[in-house]
Image: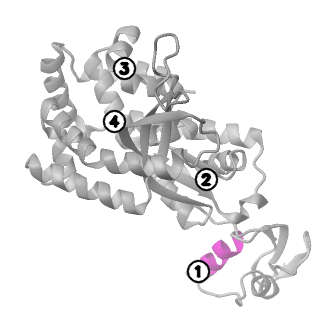
Amino acid sequence: MINLEINVPYKAKEFFMEVIGEEPKKSVNSKNRQLRLAEEKCDFYTTGKGRGMKYIITEIYSQQKMKLKGKYAEDMKTVLIYKLQNNNRRIVLPKNVLMKECGFINEKYLDATYNKKKTAEELEVMLSSVVLFCNTVDKLLGQAIKRNLNYLVDASYIIAKPKKKCKFTVIERELDKNGKIKFVNGLPERNRFNRYMLMDEEQEEFLSGAIRVALNEYNFEKQSDVFKANMGIQNMYYNKIKELISNRMVNDFTNNILLKDENIGVNVEYEVKFDYYYDVYDIRANEYIADFKISEEEYNKALKNINEMSIISIKESLNNNKTKDKRCSDINSLNFMFNEESNIVRLLEDSSQLTDKLIKI
């Protein structure tokens, strides 16, 4: 706790001893280090020069204010703390949804990633442009999300872990008094719905083993090799993993989640089908974020800042001369695949429109 008064001038020795517990240093590097440390604990300004310089505190922070690395980190901190304070201190989201929630992209981008051909037709752009644009955005902003989340974790604002999330289809059938399936309107199903389960460490280890088995069976050295294979081999690879983990995940979900649900029906049987798993970020608030009061105005301003920086980063990446040859090669490959006649000039023209429609908020 800093035992100095607000708006009162203090000499350097008294100021630094109280704020950071050190006597003022003389060398330039040491002085700059002490100033940075003081800036993390209070807001202040100086008057006078030399030995007559005085330090005047205008605000003492309730928590140490750290200068975050990363151009997105400060605004992401504002957005995520606002989200956490309004969602019981925890959010679990896939990468692309987190990108949208943090202002990197807009809602239409999520649709475009799943419906590239439809997007190309609606916006009258090349399909190859949509594919390359989404690949660029996903890689560029995905890395930014990961990197800046790590900065926030290092600064102890949040706890964030990459996890796997399973999706299940649950089929509910009503039973009669003899325990037989009761048909309603000629149909045995009473209800069908989706449920989800986050994998724990043991389940993720089991998944890792299944992935290794599938890699060996299809002669892949690593997971990145899968994306280089044709679609048929890729589908067989993923189906093999699904086959290996399905029974385990269905059993764990049924026993640990479904049957413990207080809303589970009486005289009902359930059939559970494992659909797939996907990557998510499990983000939780540290205890002291209750001290931060993020207003809606601050939240919206941070979203806008992130979006503006995101647009600049995308444009810079697509116009990077160092990767121009690679983009030209990718365009030629996609031209053959989609029977198009695109080029680098058309890609940049289309990307401008895609940025406006899919990124800008």
Q: Which residue is mark 1?
A: 28
Q: Name the mark nearer the viewer: 3 or 4.
A: 3
Q: CA distance from mark 4 to mark 2?
A: 24 Å
* Amino acid identity at mark 3: Asn
Tell me the residue at 73%/72% (across/down): 41
Q: Name the mark nearer the viewer: 2 or 3.
A: 3
Q: CA distance from mark 1 to mark 4?
A: 43 Å
Horizontal side of 160 relative to 244 (left or right) equals right
Q: CA distance from mark 3 to mark 4?
A: 16 Å
Q: CA distance from mark 1 to mark 2?
A: 27 Å
Q: Which residues are magenta?
A: 31-39
Q: Is residue 325 visible?
A: no
* Neighbour tally class for label 1: few under 14, some 14-19, many 20 plus, Cα within 10 Å: few
Q: Name the mark nearer the viewer: 1 or 2.
A: 2
Q: Which residue is mark 3?
A: 115
Q: Which residue is mark 2?
A: 74
- Looking at the image, tell me whether mark 2 or mark 3 is earlier in sequence order: 2
* Neighbour tally class for label 4: few under 14, some 14-19, many 20 plus, Cα within 10 Å: some
Q: Which residue is mark 4?
A: 136
